[in-house]
Image (tube, grey):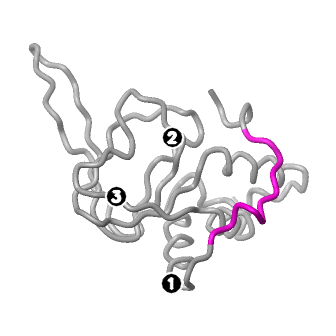
Amino acid sequence: EAIASEGSSTDLADEQHPKSEEQTSLILNALEKNFLFRCMTPKVKQLMAETMVPQTANQGDELISQNQRGCDFYVVESGTFEGIVSQEVSGKTPERVVAQFVREGSFGEMALMFDDPKWTVRCGEDNSQLWVLKRKTFCAILNDLEEEDSILGDM
């Protein structure tokens, strides 16, 4: 399911969550590094940052489960997270770590676009802090700005 099929116009001012200047800067830096957001205008990235919500995760928490539908994008403020792929081989399902995410790291962009997580992401430390962009909010921002033709910057 692609992003165009979801998200309705919403009052984005109601969706904004307070953040310190340091937290906003961390989120914007993470968005700038992520391929999905890199070419978006500063205005769009700012809206995405303003609407992200805080979340705490503890060791062993799965934020994304392999082969399960996902709908959130995450930016790591503190803690470590591992991207894990499991594949059945000879009746066993070993886990293989394929990515690690730390401060300013991000994951979940495929779930935002296609509702299609490719791997499990598990928290490695207690009291880890993340910022979450909900798919519904992401789609609403794009739909609202689509009329202004101001989603993408210079490519």
> Residue 150, relative to residue 8: is it above or below?
below
Residue furthest to the right: 147
Residue 21 vs residue 45, the one in the foreground: 21
Q: Dot 1: what SS?
A: helix
The image quarter containing residue 38 is bottom right
Residue shown at 51% from the left, 51% from the top: 73
Single out the mark in the foreground, 3 or 2. Answer: 3
Question: The disc labelled 2 sits on which kind of residue?
Answer: Met
64 vs 137, left or right, is left
Q: Quick one: quadrant of the C terminus?
A: bottom right
Q: Which residue is mark 2?
A: 110
Q: Dot 3: what SS?
A: strand
Q: Which mark is residue 78?
A: none
Residue 138 vs residue 54, the one in the foreground: 54
Residue 6 in the image: state x and y as whole percent. 72, 35
- Dots 3 and 2: beta carbons under 8 Å? no
